[in-house]
Amino acid sequence: MSETQKKFLVVAVFAYALLKGGVRPAWAQPASTTTPALPFPAMAGPLAANPNPISVDSGPIGKVYITGVVSGLAQWQTNPDPGDSTTQVDLSNGQVFVQKPDGLVQFFVHAGFYSLPSLGTAYVNAINTTSDLYGPLPEAFITLAPTDEWSIMGGKLPSLPGLEGTFSFENMNIERGLLWNQTYSVARGVQVNYSHGPISLALSWNDGFYSNRLSWLFGSATWKVDDADQLIFMGTGNTLTTSISTSATPLLQNNSQIYDTIYTHTAGRWSFSPYLQYTFVPRSPSIGVPHDLATYGAALLGDYVFDGGFRLGRLSLDGFSLPFRVEYIASSGSGAGGGLLYGSGSAAWSITVTPTYQYERFFTRAEFSYVGANHTTAGFAFGPSGSNTTQARLLLESGFLL
């Protein structure tokens, strides 16, 4: 049995025990019907978190809530990169979340194993992803909330720029998209939040692409137009030029600026999230960037949620949904490692469809994705030699939201 299979077995047994309720001590009973909506981890849907999580009465601290996720993934793809393979079977999530979401002092702790499948990049298994990127404690922070309007967070913060979250279960699709590949996921630092009426503001000083250098500034403004519409502007960038280059800290992206405009709209069982993204890396010969680099991207994410009124013969479609994503991204300039995409001046587009089913805490979803690249540079695209310009994938992910 491989290490990955052993990890998956351990987490699966833990998940089964929680679901059956056989290992809960007296002080860890299901929360009451007044359980507050837990803010973390943030989930875009259609997957829904457990509405009745385990709660622990911690005396003067108050109630602490425990949730989690365990899921496995199977993948088939064309034109795998060197070191990658045509097929994969792996643990995609084996994680536990502990949080106190109310009061003056709040906290969130996220522990476990994870893989981060994304379009147009080689798949890395959960053991190596966890070890090479953010470790078995990818997110952990304390929040001080002196009023309902003001709060300050400090620690390992969740994803800030872009639309999509870091972990697969947080998103509409299993894989994150081409635009997500240009943004950072976990940053260490502090963040101040303010909200009043329909307006929410955030300002953060952090280490960006997990560089361990507090040189990144982030700001966002959110306007909730009404119950169906929301508009977000956000920008972030490195205030210094740094030569750090690791698995978690890509050299070019860590010296970039990122700007996003995101609009969300819901209409009955439909939801849509179109957004625009621009990234910029200024000229810096000291890190191998002789000319300015940039990417220009646009994406549309959407979802349709079925109800019991839809049937295929005797089969009810209640619990089924159909998320999708289409993207286009282009790059300009030349620099180290072939630039920001698949070679200097390259462009790419993608389409992703992810039929999803959730019954209570169990979920399963399939996914088809296709990436096409143009104006690529040999050695920086797909396949063993980096010269193929397309990549198709089929994925299946199943698990439990605890």
Image (spheres, helix red, strand yellow):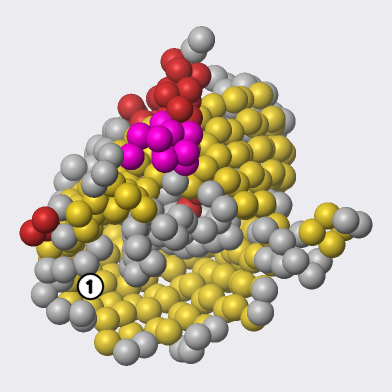
Q: Nearer the viewer, residue 301 or 41?
A: 41
Give the residue displayed 33% in from the left and 39% down from the top: 24
Q: What is the secondary structure assignment of the residue under circle 1?
A: strand
* Residue 275 within the segment the image draws in magenta: no
Residue 90 appearing in the image:
yes
Q: Position of residue 202 (x, y in %)?
A: 26, 72
Look at the picture and state if 285 lies above or below 81: below
Q: Which residues are magenta?
A: 14-24
**Magenta segment, principal secondary structure?**
helix
Residue 179 appearing in the image:
no
Give the residue displayed 58% in from the left and 60% down from the top: 46
Does residue 191 appear left or right of residue 118 in this picture?
left
Q: Position of residue 63 (x, y in %)?
A: 21, 58
Q: Residue furthest front?
A: 26
Look at the picture and state if 190 lies above or below 27: below
Does residue 32 appear left or right of residue 231 in this picture?
left
Q: Position of residue 280 (x, y in %)?
A: 39, 59
Choose top left, top right, bottom left or bottom right for residue 96. top left
| Residue type marked 1 | Asn
Q: Residue furthest left?
A: 60
Choose top left, top right, bottom left or bottom right for residue 307. bottom right
Give the residue displayed 83% in from the left and 55% down from the top: 315
Q: Residues within 10 Å of mark 1 (few under 14, many from 20)?
A: some
* Residue 20 within the segment the image draws in magenta: yes
Q: Residue furthest right?
A: 313
Give the residue displayed 12% in from the left and 68% down from the top: 104
Q: Position of residue 380 (x, y in %)?
A: 56, 34
Does residue 326 appear left or right of residue 135 in this picture?
right
- Residue pointed to by mark 1: 193
